[in-house]
Image: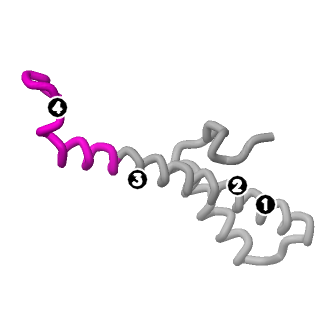
Amino acid sequence: MGTVAEEKPELSYEQARDELTDVVRRLEAGGLTLEESLALWERGERLAAICEEWLEGARARLAAAMAERAEPAERPEGAPF
């Protein structure tokens, strides 16, 4: 079993974020058995990792785009991008 970074997220960022919000709401409401609480906690951890993976990917893409924009002189003459 690989790390979260090696796995393709099964949910979009928005889906994971929304489900994580629901998990937190359910945990805060209480009234769950210990097993239910532990299962929700574990799911919340996985959802948080998925969100972090999406955010890290977005940061990397943004950094690459900013670096490309900041270094136009290094592109070959006549290259449009």
User: What secondary structure is marked by label 4?
Assistant: loop
Q: CA distance from mark 3 to mark 1?
A: 26 Å
User: What secondary structure is marked by label 2?
Assistant: helix
Q: CA distance from mark 2 to mark 1?
A: 6 Å
- What residue did someone put label 3 on? 59
Number of residues whose C-alpha sits closer than 10 Å to that of mark 3, classed few (under 14), some (14–19) or many (20 or more)? few
Residue depicted at 25% across the width and 49% down the height: 66
- What residue did someone put label 2 on? 46
Looking at the image, is mark 4 or mark 1 earlier in the sequence? 1
Mark 4 or 1: in front is 4
| x then y, percent, for residue 50 | 61, 51
Q: CA distance from mark 4 to mark 3?
A: 23 Å
| x then y, percent, for residue 78 | 8, 22
Q: Could you say which quadrant of the image residue 31 lies in?
A: bottom right
Number of residues whose C-alpha sits closer than 10 Å to that of mark 2, classed few (under 14), some (14–19) or many (20 or more)? some
- What residue did someone put label 4 on? 75
Q: CA distance from mark 3 to mark 2?
A: 20 Å
Q: Tell me which amino acid carries mark 4.
A: Arg
In the displayed orientation, state which residue is furthest to the left.
78
Kindly indicate whether the residue at mark 1 contacts the one at mark 2 (C-beta within 8 angstroms). yes
Number of residues whose C-alpha sits closer than 10 Å to that of mark 4, classed few (under 14), some (14–19) or many (20 or more)? few
Against 17, residue 8 (above or below) is: above
Q: Which residues are magenta?
A: 62-81
Instruction: Look at the image and tell me in which quarter the N terminus lies.
Output: top right
Against 8, residue 5 (above or below) is: below
Against 25, residue 4 (above or below) is: above
Q: CA distance from mark 4 to mark 1?
A: 47 Å
